[in-house]
Image (cartoon, rainbow, N blue to C red):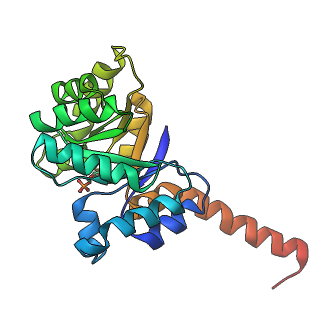
């Protein structure tokens, strides 16, 4: 499974990319708003992220409401950098826009996916990525991972005539990451805080402390 970082924060992206283990970035309007960014700077911000990521896919979300406007905004976003993927929220208008953009060779990441039928329709329309949300189900007392499992199975049951990758989104915990990988989800897009938690384990900390203490016996260091 590949890791994307789910943020629009430039410093977080730079730090996470420096690990050499990440394969892309996803953003959304809320994540951009969180950076304090203004509308006038949005495109430059996306270009900056695309440059930092050197060819890796960077999802930039359209806020257009009609199919024509989504296609126009999608074409524009995709023209900003070769690695920008157009993110569209699943609905009738965005399916039609996805179909049109895919015909032009523009990659679409269909977001706000909460059910298998939504995911299947997105893939059929030509979406290159489908993003089922996990954590937001958990937030309302449902089991996000159960829904993800249904979606992964349904998507993997079929050949859509083009590559479709499942981006596990709305990830909150390392457990979400593990379960998504066990299900065979292609990608997990993970906020920086949760990514750092994925690196940690108390037995790693304990092991490191004892190696350091034992090495001092070897070196004589106090
Ligand atoms: C990513 O594509 C989604 O926009 C994001 O993962 C949503 O996460 P949230 O539910 O934590 O806002």
Q: Is residue 162 visible?
A: yes
Q: Is residue 22 left or right of residue 166?
A: right
Instruction: Report the residue at 18% width, 49% height from top.
Output: 136
Q: Determine the residue located farthest toward the bottom in the rendered image.
A: 222
Q: Looking at this view, is 28 or 135 the one in front?
A: 28
Total of numbered circles in the picture? 0
The extreme right residue here reads 219
Name the image quarter holding the C terminus. bottom right
Q: Residue at x 48, y 54 (%)?
A: 198
Q: Is residue 80 left or right of residue 115?
A: right
On the image, which quarter does residue 204 sit in?
bottom right
Q: Is residue 33 above or below residue 144?
A: below
Q: Where residue 119 sits in the image (x, y, percent)?
A: 23, 29
Up-down: is 186 above or below 27? Answer: above
Residue 171, visible in the rendered structure: no
**Quarter of the image where one finds residue 182:** top left
Image spot of residue 109 (x, y percent): 31, 41
Residue 108 in percent (x, y) is at 32, 39
Tell which of 178 and 168 is nearer to you. Answer: 168
Q: Give the residue at x 75% y 72%.
A: 213
Residue at the (43%, 34%) spot, across then down: 186
């Amino acid at each position: 499974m590949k890791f994307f970082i789910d943020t629009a924060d430039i410093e977080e992206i730079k730090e996470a990319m420096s690990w050499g283990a990440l394969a892309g970035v996803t953003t959304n309007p809320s994540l951009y708003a969180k950076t304090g960014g203004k509308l006038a700077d949005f495109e430059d911000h996306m270009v900056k992220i695309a440059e930092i990521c050197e060819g890796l896919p960077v999802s930039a979300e359209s806020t257009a409401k009609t199919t024509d406007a989504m296609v126009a905004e999608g074409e524009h976003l995709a023209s900003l950098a070769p690695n920008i993927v157009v993110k569209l929220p699943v609905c009738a208008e965005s399916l039609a826009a996805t179909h049109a953009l895919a015909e032009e060779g523009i990659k679409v990441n269909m977001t706000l996916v909460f059910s298998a039928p939504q995911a299947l329709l997105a893939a059929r329309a030509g979406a290159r990525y489908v993003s089922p949300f996990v954590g937001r189900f958990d937030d309302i007392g449902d089991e996000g991972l159960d829904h993800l499992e249904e979606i992964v199975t349904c998507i993997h049951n079929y050949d859509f005539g083009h590559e479709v990758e499942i981006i596990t989104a709305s990830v909150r915990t390392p457990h979400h990451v593990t379960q998504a990988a066990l299900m065979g989800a292609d990608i997990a897009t993970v906020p920086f805080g949760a990514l750092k938690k994925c690196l940690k384990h108390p037995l790693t900390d304990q092991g490191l402390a004892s190696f350091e203490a034992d090495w001092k016996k070897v070196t004589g260091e106090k």
